[in-house]
Amino acid sequence: MNFIKFLGTAGARIVVAKQLRASGGMWLSLDDTNILIDPGPGCLVRCVSSRPRLDPTKLDGIVLSHKHLDHSADINVMMEAMTMGGHTKKGIVLVPKDAVSGDDPIIYKYIRPYVSKIELLKEKGKYKIGNIEIHSPVKHIHGVIINVLRVEPSNLDHLCIEDVKKIIKSIKPKTAILTHFGMWMIKAKPWEIAEQLSKESKTEVIAARDGMAFEVR
């Protein structure tokens, strides 16, 4: 079965620190390829405690959108788990440049040789992991799976509900899934917001739950 498993739906520091929602990222299984996306705090624990269990050694690659801790905290441990501690060299890891260079890289140098390849994500880039082709047409714009931190617009560079409406209207997906909830979204009850968005947009909008598996058809 092709699916997306939400290992966590937390976004922003407070929700992650208090673990009001889990913060493990997402596991994509599609066309006999397994990809981990944004392995935040607790990702490994969420994988092995998942039902059915998600085996990190079955991963074909890891994608990191950016290096904030709620997206990246477990990337080193997941690279190690994917390769059985470096005993099996495998896997492609896609990361932004600052994850592996500069004054504050987040991927340890000793772990980098464990994987088959580390590729840098670039605007208008095209990559392949297993049978899946990945495009990064623009910088940090989310598609059908939408990270929503806030209800109302603010001066912070994060998505809000109005942004979600614009994205849905622009790309017209069959289904839009909201995740990565900040405190404002948690208080506003994401499932109620998703229901309202569904009515307004005539598009199926789902608020992701920790541990939710969504079948990809």
Image (cartoon, grey):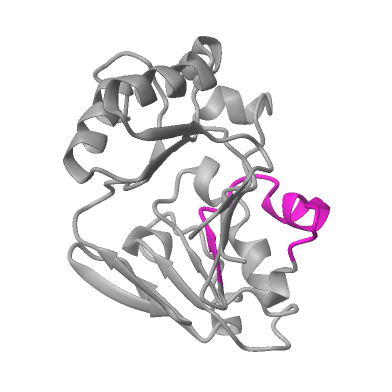
Residue 116 lies, with reference to residue 153, above or below; the image says below
Residue under the image location 19 percent in, 55 percent down: 138
Residue 67 placement, left or right of 5: left
Residue 212 placement, left or right of 50: left
Is residue 156 something that shows in the picture? Answer: no
Total of numbered circles in the picture? 0
Residue 34 lies, with reference to residue 5, above or below; the image says below
Give x and y (percent) for residue 26. 56, 52
Q: Choose top left, top right, bottom left or bottom right for residue 132.
A: bottom left
Residue under the image location 55 percent in, 80 percent down: 91
Between 29 and 72, the one nearer to me in the picture = 29
Is 46 covered by the magenta stretch? yes
Give x and y (percent) for residue 146. 38, 39
Is residue 195 something that shows in the picture? Answer: yes
Between 78 and 51, the one nearer to me in the picture = 51
Residue 127 lies, with reference to residue 162, above or below; the image says below
Residue 203 placement, left or right of 27: left
Q: Report the magenta residues as a range.
A: 34-54
Which quadrant is home to the N terminus?
A: bottom right
Residue under the image location 37 percent in, 16 percent down: 151
Q: Choose top left, top right, bottom left or bottom right for residue 193.
A: top left
Is 142 covered by the magenta stretch? no
Between 31 and 42, the one nearer to me in the picture = 31
Give x and y (percent) for residue 14. 57, 22
